[in-house]
Amino acid sequence: MLEFDKVMLELYGFLAAWCAARSIPLIWLDLTVMIIAGLIMIGVLSLAALFLVWWERKVSAHLQDRLGPMRTGTHGVLQTLADGIKLLQKEDIVPSAADKRVYFWAPVVAFVAAYLAYIVIPFGKGLIARDLNIGILYIIAITSFTVISLLMAGWASNNKYALLGGMRSAAQIVSYEVPLTISVLGAVMLAGSLSMVDIVEAQGPYFWKWYWLPQILGFGIYFISATAEANRTPFDLPEAEQELVAGFNVEYSGMKFAMFFLAEFVNMFTISAIATTLFLGGWQPPLPGLAFIPSWIWFMGKTLFLVFVLMWFRWTYPRLRVDQLMNFAWKFLLPLAFLNLILTGLGVYFFG
Amino acid sequence: MDRPRFRPHAGKITVDNMIENKDLREEEFLINMGPQHPSTHGVLRLILKMEGEFIRDLTPYVGYLHRSIEKIAENRTYNQFMPFTDRIDYCASMPSNLAWATAVEKLAAIEVPERAEYLRVIMVELNRIASHLIWLGTMSLDLGAVTPFLYAFREREWILDLFEMTCGQRLTYHYIRIGGVARDIPVEFEKSCRAFIKDFRRRVDDYEAILTENPIFLGRTKDIGILPLDLAKDLGASGPTIRGSNYGWDIRKVEPYSVYDRFDFQIPIGANGDVWDRYMVRIEEFRQSCKIIEQALDGLPEGDTVRSKLPTVLRPPAGEVFSRIEAPRGEMGYYIVSNGDKKPFRVKIRTASYGNLQCLRPTSIGLKIADLVAIFGSLDVILPEVDR
Amino acid sequence: MTKEQITARLKDKFGPELEIVENNQPEPYFYISMAKYYELCSYAKNDPQLDFDFLFQLGAVHYPDDRFEVALCLCSHEKNHKAVVKVRLDHDNPETVTISDIWKAANWFEREAMELFGIGFFGHPDPQPLLLYDDWDYGYPMRKGWTGPDFVPMPEK
């Protein structure tokens, strides 16, 4: 079976030797490898986002007793590609009273913030762009960038609906950041490391040893808060269609809109990937006997299952109201997250 | 009004500086909601005076669908006007037809064959279900739940198929005529209709399973938009809106028209007039309508005549008449002044949404914009009815 | 209450100001004089016997070269009876008082009559146009014989 880490290491060793023979400093090789890895990442993630858009449409369609896209390609697999091409050709409308620079940069910030998180996500054994020793901290910091982009979009559009959407998103994301971070700490305490790779390896190839069982509370809190962070129903207040038309992106059109749209789906994938890494054993197989299946397939399978759960939420639940959303975060999730933290601390102290 | 603009601060940013700086301030602002807005159910325009998320005042502006149907009525004969009644409430055309037919029959003292009366009841009740399905779909959509919308439209499709089978139309039926109905039902109608009722009972339970006890749905609807009974009466609310405010008022019961006095059905009422009560009233009306349709199908008398013989150009005696029926949204009625001519001298159309829409302002002031959307959904206002 | 009882009760109160229309409808129809219009409405709403708590509709009728009429269809929820009250208005200067402080439902009905027939309702709290578009400047379209710029009369056979 193809094990990426060995292949990569051998390739890197070969290239390093090649460079050493020609007395090229190793930094150049490192830089090239990083750029190539980054480009691959962007390409793969964009494809994944396209796939997720199609998948969401199919999931929603089947949940709603209809077929969804069927015309472009087999079962409409090329539908999002066609939509993307259409959006590329659309006129890019900028409201005359908008703050042009901020308006332009908002989708870029959203896009970049969504993609940067993938640097530290281990897609498989050895399949990680950079194993930072503060991996989870880095992710929390980077995903918070999203709120800035939403605020920028809401403010710069010079539209009251967009402004309300931006304000809602600021309040919502900042509030849910707190229980999210605290719930993540439980897994970090159990693993004793902030590095994503260490956390995965600490969980081992037995599904009952993964952190979802000792951290069942933390897993629940993380998943709910992350749903709110990604602005998915039932927490999709910033873009509540029936109240604020489209919220922060009401004025956006063409490719800028598509960037927000893709960023949303990439974010959805991110939170599922983090949940998989922290609580579902990452790329570890559920039993050691199943290790013949490549690790990245396990990772993708678990992540896509969580993505499906998110989609299931979206097409089942109504939307919360602003005050209910805030009450839920501060009065329910946060105390629960602290309780989880204390319990984990006690557990680690006595049994760890 | 000032538009929010992003301007970098000139001086050093301190708290004092921020308060004095005119760029940073709290103020009420106006939002123009509609006529193009996803949850104004057509073309209602609301000017909201907002303070953050809170609504301080709101003014509805109607008239975007004004077609002057009352003026048209003065230039058409009584039979010619019937297709226009379809367009008054295009989600519930059959009750609109029935309202006009009963008004003219009352004015000209026309007898209707018994079989036609039963067919009218079947069609009107089917249309009540179809109309409530649109309400259920759009209201759950307003609350952010998309899936019930498509479930509701799936069931509505079956009803439209039944109507198409009967009269050939799927939206504006023009089926109920003065003195009866246009034609008899086809043979396969009864079987399909019974199958629909059987299936639909189960579907209503499904809707309840997905919405009624959902904590998010309860949080969004319970104690929101309470309409006190006195206010409801004063504002001219009717139909499920007033029944939600704990008042069992239904024209089908208190003043039976057609053959409604022969059927056994209950009037569901709500407890305190909030959004959830209005929702429950309509959900229960699904079941009651099913009951009425089944009884009407059982008791459908045999016969060939479904329309009494009338002169081609109807000339009712001079006089005036005022008649009302229970449409899905509430009381719908016509006030007709006749001068003995073939055309009505004056027709005044009173529709349910006209009264119900006026309940929007008192119930939603002080609440949030999300509540406004929920309340508006629960009132089930349809704009062509208001504007006519 | 039956038709006769309602008629008798109002006749007792208003005497010659009330003019009964004879017809074979189940509801009573009558004319009230302009002077007693508001008083009758107030009485109909507040009298415990009549208890007309629901204004079903308020509509204007134009009789060309003669008069305007405002017709109120009143209903009672508790007593379950109905009545139609009409008032004659002057043709050249159609004006009456508002009853929107008695029934709030009258507010929009009066705005509509104001806009489409040009009837003045003295004391109306919000005398704004309701249905027609903002720069409508072609008179009162529901009056008989009205013509506007795009108006094509119905061809007579």
Image (cartoon, rainbow, N blue to C red):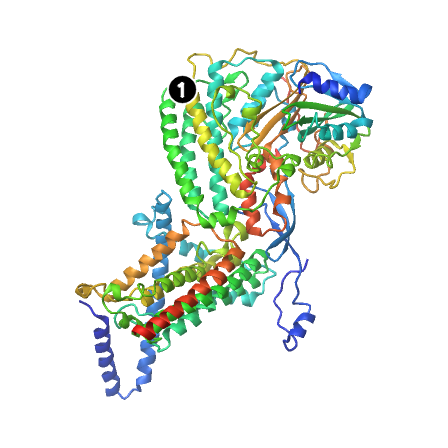
Relative to B344, is A161 on the left or the right? left
Q: Is residue B279 left or right of residue B363?
A: left
Count of numbered marks: 1
Q: Residue B233 sits in which quadrant?
A: top right
- Please tell me which residue lies in front, A43 or B334: B334
Which quadrant of the figure has residue C81? top right
Q: Nearer the viewer, residue B92 or A93?
A: B92
Q: Would residue A92 be visible to someone looking at this image? A: no
Secondary structure of the residue carrying tag 1 is helix
Q: Which sits in the foreground, B371 or B66?
A: B371
Q: Answer yes or no: is residue B152 visible.
A: yes
Q: Nearer the viewer, residue C12 or A221?
A: C12
Q: Chain letter of disc 1? A: B
Rendered view: B329 above or below A254: above
On-image quarter of the C terminus of chain A: bottom left
**Amino acid identity at mark 1:** Asp
Depicted A273 relative to depicted B246: above or below: below
Q: Position of residue C49 (x, y in %)?
A: 70, 25
Identify the residue position indicated by label 1 in the image: B298
In what quadrant of the picture does the N terminus of chain A appear? bottom left
Q: Residue at x 41, y 44 (%)?
A: B210
Outermost residue to the bottom? A23
Vertically, is C37 above or below A282? above
Q: Position of residue B294 (x, y in %)?
A: 41, 24
Q: Residue at x 36, y 28 (%)?
A: B195
Where does the image place residue A297, in percent across and percent down from the top left? 25, 62
- The residue positioned 40% from the left and 56% from the top of the image is A85
- Give the percent coordinates (x, y) of residue A75: 31, 48
Q: Is A179 rendered above or below residue B285? A: below
**Residue C147 in the figure: left or right of residue A237:** right
